[in-house]
Image (cartoon, rainbow, N blue to C red):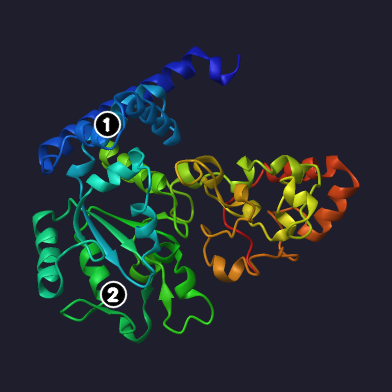
């Protein structure tokens, strides 16, 4: 009898899920009792945004599956969403371009993720707040005092650590980004890095990195949950906050601090161009006939096989499209140091293997074009991958 049909195994799984459900209910009770009341009724906000109750229920089902939870948790996901505006958030901007905030804010037709982000209790956000100067500093101090140990610190941007952090000073009091991040994160319930800059250093840490910029975890020596991407998908941030509201902690992460539910699979694994890869059908130059027919972009520098993210599943612009679907290869922006390790961005990395025991792109092209089965055989090996980190150059 298989494990999945073994009654004893099923009973054990059932007990574990029931225990998790009780933990979830208890934590949501705590959220509703200890955090500030919701600033607005979510049902009214959704209605104003043109979202029906049916749409919300459908979204709750999709988000439950996305968070890798069984269907019994759909009511808990909906309940957590209704408490979204209770969660205090202090959002710091360090060495970055504000692109992550822009990606979260800009939308023509708001979906539920966008609406939830609009209702979030932002106690401090330098780009959005009306206050400036000393008044802004006072707002930050008040938020840390009023919600000590209860707020989420979200950090956008890397930390320049050279010259004791003096490459970046912020605010009317002239604190360095390093000082400010240390102070705020020490009082936060958890720290979430939004984007690859705060997660891994990204462009600011690219060679030769004169300011010695680093990701938050490396710079401060603290655990963080890294919502990697340049920019990341809003659903990955929303899902992480929902998990925190439901369970009182941040989700399980991979070896790079990224939520497993969002970054546990390679982009390549769910790419609509994957069958062409397996068949050895590649675009050879921009605009050629294979490009028009939607063939694989691997030889044009697509880094999908090296990149762990859910872009090919959640897509962007309300699920309409994503870069590879639109005709450009993945740049690997959810991976550490992608600006250096994935370069050149529009050419294959000939000396880089896809994963351990796999062939390089040049050898792969020759073999796959010789026999369709070669591409499939290569990926049979890839399915046994042991780790998520890309090979070092």
Q: Nearer the viewer, mark 2 or mark 1?
A: 2
Viewer-nearest residue: 337 or 280 = 280
Q: Relative to 96, does residue 56 appear above or below in the rendering?
A: above
Counting other residues with Cα less than 10 Å from the Cα at mark 1, is it few (<14), some (14-19), or many (20 or more)? many
Q: Residue at x 53, y 59 (%)?
A: 335
Identify the mark at residue 24; answer none if there is no mark.
1
- Image quadrant where one finds the C terminus: bottom right
Give the camera-side residue of 143 and 250.
143
Residue 75 placement (x, y as % from top left): 30, 25
Question: Does 383 sit above or below residue 344?
Answer: above
**Which residue is at the front of the view, 97 or 27?**
97
Q: Relative to residue 321, is residue 163 depicted above or below?
A: below
Q: Residues within 10 Å of mark 2 (few under 14, many from 20)?
A: many
SS under mark 2: helix
- Work out how far the residue at label 2 is from the one at label 1, CA to CA, in angstroms: 35 Å
Q: Is residue 27 visible?
A: no
Quadrant in which the N terminus appears:
top right
Q: Is residue 159 left or right of residue 26?
A: right
Q: Which residue is mark 2?
A: 177
Counting from the top left corner in percent of width and height, residue 264 is at 52, 44
Residue drawn at 36 percent across, 53 percent down? 106
Q: Quadrant of residue 5?
A: top right
Report the side of 379 relative to 24 (left or right): right
The location of residue 250, given as percent across then percent down, is: 33, 46
């Amino acid at each position: 009898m298989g494990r999945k049909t073994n009654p004893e195994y099923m009973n054990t799984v059932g007990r574990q899920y029931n225990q998790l459900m009780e933990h979830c209910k208890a934590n949501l009770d705590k959220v509703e009792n200890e955090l500030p009341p919701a600033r607005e009724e979510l049902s009214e906000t959704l209605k104003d945004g043109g979202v029906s109750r049916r749409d919300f229920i459908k979204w709750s089902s999709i988000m439950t599956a996305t968070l890798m939870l069984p269907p019994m948790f759909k009511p808990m996901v909906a309940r957590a969403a209704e408490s979204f505006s209770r969660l205090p958030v202090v959002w710091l901007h360090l060495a970055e371009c504000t692109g992550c905030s822009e990606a979260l804010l800009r939308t023509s037709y708001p979906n539920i993720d966008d609406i939830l982000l609009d209702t979030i209790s932002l106690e401090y956000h330098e780009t959005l707040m009306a206050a400036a100067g000393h008044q802004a500093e006072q707002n930050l101090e008040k938020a840390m005092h009023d919600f000590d140990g209860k707020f989420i610190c979200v950090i956008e941007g890397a930390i320049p650590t050279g010259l004791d952090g003096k490459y970046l000073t912020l605010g009317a009091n002239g604190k360095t980004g390093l000082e400010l991040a240390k102070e705020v994160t020490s009082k936060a319930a958890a720290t979430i890095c939004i984007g690859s800059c705060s997660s891994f250093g990204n462009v600011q840490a690219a060679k030769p990195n004169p300011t010695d910029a680093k990701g938050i975890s490396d710079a401060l020596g603290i655990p963080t949950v890294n919502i990697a991407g340049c920019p990341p998908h809003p659903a990955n941030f929303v899902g992480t906050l929902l998990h925190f509201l439901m369970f009182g902690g941040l989700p399980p992460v991979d070896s790079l601090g990224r939520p497993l539910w969002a970054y546990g699979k390679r982009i390549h694994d769910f790419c609509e161009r994957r069958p062409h890869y397996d068949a050895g059908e590649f675009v050879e130059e921009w605009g050629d006939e294979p490009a028009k027919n939607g063939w694989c972009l691997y030889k044009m520098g697509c880094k999908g096989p090296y990149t762990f993210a859910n872009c090919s599943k959640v897509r962007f612009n309300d699920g309409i499209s994503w870069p590879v679907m639109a005709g450009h290869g993945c740049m690997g922006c959810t991976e550490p140091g992608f600006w250096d390790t994935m370069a050149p961005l529009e050419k294959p990395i000939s000396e880089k293997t896809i994963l351990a025991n796999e062939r390089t792109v040049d050898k792969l092209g020759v073999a796959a074009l010789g026999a369709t089965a070669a591409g499939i055989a290569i990926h049979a090996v890839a399915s046994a991958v042991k780790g998520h980190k890309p090979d070092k150059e």
